[in-house]
Amino acid sequence: QAGQKALAEVEAESDCRAQAAHEQREVVLRERETALEGPKQALEQLDKDTNQCDIERQIRDLEEERRQLLLDLEETSQHLAKERDARLDVLRRRDAAVADHRQLAQGLETQLQDLRPAQFYQVKEFRAASMTEGEILAGLRQTAGKCHSLGEKFLTAGRDSSSQNIGEFQKQKETLASQTKDHLQTHGRLEVSWLEAAGASAATCVATLMDVARARSDLRARGLSPELDSVYSAAALPRRQDMRQLRAALVSAEAAWHEALQMWGEPAETEQGKAVLQQLEASRQRIARCLADLQNADPLLYELAFAEEEDAVHLSPATDQQLPHGWEAHVSEEDDDLVYYHNLVTDQTQWELPVQDAAISAGWRLFQAEDGAWFYHNPYDGTGVWWPELPDYPAEPDSLDDLRRDAAAHG
């Protein structure tokens, strides 16, 4: 009985659920019919309204006529542009012909002026414009005779004066030759002293470095590495002051040698010059032997002595502040490592920090297109360049004459 009762309850619950599902299905079907009723009525109304199709056909015909009118307008514009270019070409050729005509007229006028007697014989007297050719020739002959007589007088006086001046010039020449010889001897002694002083300084530095080389050699003999800072002794440590002084002495010696060559020539033409160069060459050989001894004693120390010393660390010229587009920063090697800025458009440099785009400072204009991209525009020739690409020339107006002709043509 309990099972039958439970089965009856299940059947009752199943019937209730089936009845609820049937009712929900009926509600959904009625909502669907209600939703489809509007589109069906609209479709029936559209089938009945035949005028709507005619209106759409007329709209398509009007669009086709509009497109054809636009094509005709474009063709007419191109034709007018060609006619305008042809008219401008004719005006340019007319201007060129007028300029050539004016130049020819000026040339003929100049030739006519040159054929007049006063101009032909190059007479500067203002009365020559009203004189005949015979009168001008007679005056020229008379003037030539007077000039010839004056020339003879001046020539005689010049000969007498020159004979007196020659003796004085000869004495001055001998005095200058003697002074020059004395000065050259003094200069030669100074050059030799300069090079010997540089050689003595180099020899002193090399002697100090030779002591360092021997100390390094002793460390190697004891089985120690002289390259480790922990095993360097005071005697085995090369001083920067000695290496710097050695390089300065060699630079001074080389400058003295080149100055002597410029003064005396190579080979020397005089006995005095040959003697000076021989003394300088002997000093150079002594310096070379000192350097050879240092290189043979310790090649690594020799290379270290002539290595370029970095007294300061040169940083990149870039700063925390970002430069405008199209500018580059560089360090000047001639002006105490100052930073200058290079414009990639105009290829010009400046010391001041730029605050404007390189192309804009060169006359270009920056605009934004409809799609959001940016581009540079030249207001003078109408060209454009898409950003971030830079133009390769500044935007400058044409000459004043070209602007006037273009304005007159368009006016």
Image (cartoon, rainbow, N blue to C red):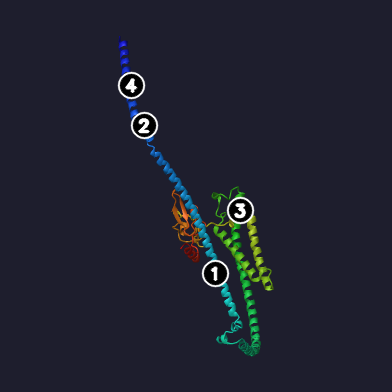
Q: Are marks 2 and 1 in contact (CB under 8 Å)?
A: no
Amino acid type of the residue that numbered disc 3 sits on in the rendered structure: Leu
Q: Which dot marks residue 300?
A: 3
Would you place residue 277 above or below residue 291 in this image?
below
Along the viewing direction, whichever of 299 and 14 lies nearer the viewer: 14
Closer to the eye: label 4 or 1: 1
Amino acid type of the residue that numbered disc 1 sits on in the rendered structure: Val
Horizontal arrangement in the rendering, residue 101 relative to residue 1 (left or right): right
Would you place residue 393 above or below residue 155 in this image?
above
Amino acid type of the residue that numbered disc 2 sits on in the rendered structure: Lys
Q: Are marks 4 and 3 in contact (CB under 8 Å)?
A: no
Q: Residues within 10 Å of mark 1 (few under 14, many from 20)?
A: few
Which residue in the protein does label 4 denote?
Answer: 22
Local SS, label 1: helix
Among the two numbered marks 1 and 3 on one chain, the one whose residue lies closer to the N terminus = 1
Which residue in the protein does label 1 denote?
Answer: 98
Local SS, label 3: helix
CA–CA distance between discs 2 and 1?
83 Å
CA–CA distance between discs 4 and 2?
27 Å
Would you place residue 45 above or below residue 405 in this image?
above
Q: Which dot marks residue 40?
A: 2
> At which x and y percent is residue 384?
49, 54
Along the viewing direction, whichever of 282 and 2 lies nearer the viewer: 2
Among the two numbered marks 2 and 1 on one chain, the one whose residue lies closer to the N terminus = 2
Task: Assign the N terminus to one quadrant of the image.
Answer: top left
Local SS, label 2: helix
Q: Residues within 10 Å of mark 2 (few under 14, many from 20)?
A: few
> At which x and y percent is residue 130?
56, 86
Closer to the eye: label 1 or 3: 1
Local SS, label 4: helix
